[in-house]
Structure formats: structure tokens, C-alpha cells
Image (cartoon, rainbow, N blue to C red):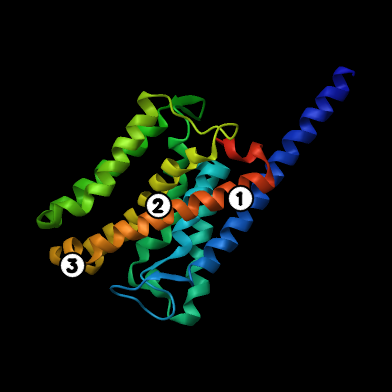
């Protein structure tokens, strides 16, 4: 095979891979918008057909896993906007009650994507992705505790997410589609907590929900929701990687 032929083959493969990632990204946006109309819970503040929390949280981490942090962030912004538009005929749901939730999928995609690799290139500079993700989570914890310190335990799942993220950095645990798909579980859990962070901060600073509600009403429900989201999201990720190929699972672009 000539060098020119090899070059052409490599270019075609790269183009095919990028096209496939974008196509899957579009599918994930559509899936996120559709699942935003499927209630998971409606324990407080539900509006219209869409509940305070929907099954869309299962999709948000996959944007970062499939597309990487930077492209995933962009697609996540689009997903949040599209989900808001789709939910408007049903009252707008959580997106109008807590506008910060619109950025949930973008935040989940960005920081989940960063956590997938021990280092990520940014303008030619290697940055420690998991550490940056952990710093973001710590900021969320501090901002919450400043106002709602009476229900401090609400942040326990976030603290676990910090430990998981630091484990990624210290143990060099990186997502590899050639290994067991069980490795999706910690990344999906992390992404589910990141997606929830926008709702949590909005609930604190926009809705000003009291500590009692956070600690005794929302917290038990959140534990159930994050568990469901983690396993359903991992199952969905398994299906996507099986159908669309391994190369979309190792993006860091």
C-alpha cells in the first residue's frame, strides 16, 4: 500500500469517526429532549407535564463520554435549550422554575468529559481533568453549605463524587471502551451529580428552598433518583457504544 493510500485511509477513518460522534450527539440531544418530558419524580415544584426531575438525567453524562468535554459542552447547551422549548407546551417544567437547570447537561458533559482522562489538552497545554472536576464539585458543596448548612448531609453524594473523581486522577483510571462496560457506572454517577448541581444551586439561590425540605424531603428522593439514573445511564451507554462502535467512547476533543 502506498503512502498516499495510507494517508487517504487514515483521513477517511478520521472523518467517519468524527461524523459518527456528531450523529450520535444529535441523537443524544433528541433523546434528552424527549426524556425531559418523562417524569422521574415530582416531589416538589413540578410544573406542567414535566416534573422537577426527569429521565433526561440519564443522558447528560453520555454527552461528555461520547463527545468529550469541549464538544460535549456545546451539545449539552443545545440539549438544555431544546428540552426547554419542547417542555413549554406542557408548562415549561423545571426549566422555567429553576433556569440554571438548562445548563445541567452542558455542565455534566464538560466535567464528565474532563474526568475521563487523567490529562486533557487545552490550547496545547495539558490540564488535570479529574482535579478540575473535583474543584468544581467542591465549589458547589461550599456554595450550598454557606446557605443551607443545617442540612449538610444533602451534600454527601457530592462528596462521594469528589472522592470518585480524585480516584480517577490518583489511580490513572481512564475510560477505555476495550475494557468492561461496567466502567461506565462511576462516570455516569459522576455525570448525574454534575447535572444535578445546577438544579441544587438554583434551588438554593433562586427558589430559596428551606433546609428542612432539602434534608428530609429532597435528600431521600435524590438518593433513589441518582441510583436509577446511574444504572439506566450505564445501560444506555452500553447500548450506544455497542451499536455505534468503540471509537466514539474514547473521545477527548
Determine crowd level at label 3: few under 14, some 14-19, many 20+ residues with C-alpha closer than 10 A.
few
Determine crowd level at label 1: few under 14, some 14-19, many 20+ residues with C-alpha closer than 10 A.
few
Give me the C-alpha separation between circle 1 and circle 3. 37 Å
Is 132 placed left or right of 49 in the picture?
left
Q: Is residue 26 above or below residue 67?
A: below
Residue identifier under label 1: 239
Residue 22: percent from left, percent from top: 65, 49
Is 225 placed left or right of 210 in the picture?
right
Query: SS class of the residue under badge 3?
Result: helix
Q: Is residue 125 above or below residue 245?
A: above
Residue 249: percent from left, percent from top: 59, 39
Determine crowd level at label 2: few under 14, some 14-19, many 20+ residues with C-alpha closer than 10 A.
many
Total numbered labels placed on residues in the image: 3
Residue 81: percent from left, percent from top: 49, 64
In front here: 61 or 231? 231
Looking at the image, the residue that sits furthest to the left is 150
**Residue at the spot 57% in from the left edge and 59% down from the top edge:** 29
Quarter holding residue 214: bottom left
Quadrant of the rendering where the N terminus is positioned: top right
Q: Nearer the viewer, mark 2 or mark 1?
A: 1
**Residue at the spot 24% in from the left edge and 60% down from the top edge:** 219
Residue identifier under label 2: 192
Quadrant of the rendering where the C terminus is positioned: top right
Residue identifier under label 3: 213
Q: Nearer the viewer, mark 1 or mark 3?
A: 1
Amino acid at each position: 500500500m502506498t503512502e498516499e493510500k495510507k494517508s487517504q485511509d487514515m483521513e477517511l477513518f478520521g472523518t467517519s469517526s468524527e461524523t459518527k460522534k456528531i450523529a450520535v450527539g444529535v441523537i443524544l440531544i433528541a433523546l434528552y429532549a424527549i426524556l425531559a418530558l418523562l417524569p422521574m419524580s415530582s416531589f416538589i415544584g413540578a410544573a406542567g407535564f414535566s416534573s422537577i426531575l426527569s429521565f433526561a438525567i440519564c443522558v447528560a453524562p453520555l454527552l461528555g463520554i461520547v463527545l468529550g468535554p469541549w464538544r460535549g459542552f456545546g451539545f449539552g447547551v443545545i440539549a438544555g435549550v431544546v428540552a426547554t422549548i419542547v417542555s413549554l407546551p406542557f408548562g415549561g417544567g423545571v426549566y422555567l422554575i429553576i433556569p440554571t437547570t438548562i445548563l445541567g447537561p452542558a455542565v455534566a458533559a464538560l466535567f464528565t468529559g474532563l474526568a475521563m482522562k487523567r490529562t486533557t489538552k487545552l490550547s496545547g497545554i495539558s490540564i488535570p481533568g479529574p482535579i478540575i472536576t473535583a474543584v468544581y464539585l467542591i465549589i458547589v458543596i461550599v456554595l450550598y453549605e454557606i446557605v443551607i448548612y443545617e442540612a449538610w448531609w444533602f451534600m454527601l453524594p457530592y462528596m462521594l463524587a469528589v472522592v470518585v473523581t480524585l480516584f480517577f486522577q490518583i489511580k490513572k483510571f481512564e475510560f477505555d471502551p476495550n475494557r468492561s462496560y461496567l466502567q461506565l457506572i462511576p462516570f455516569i454517577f459522576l455525570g448525574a451529580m454534575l447535572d444535578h448541581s445546577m438544579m441544587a444551586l438554583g434551588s438554593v439561590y433562586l427558589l430559596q428552598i428551606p433546609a428542612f425540605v432539602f434534608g428530609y424531603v429532597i435528600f431521600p428522593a435524590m438518593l433513589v433518583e441518582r441510583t436509577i439514573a446511574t444504572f439506566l445511564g450505564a445501560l444506555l451507554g452500553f447500548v450506544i457504544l455497542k451499536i455505534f462502535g468503540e471509537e466514539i467512547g474514547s473521545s477527548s476533543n
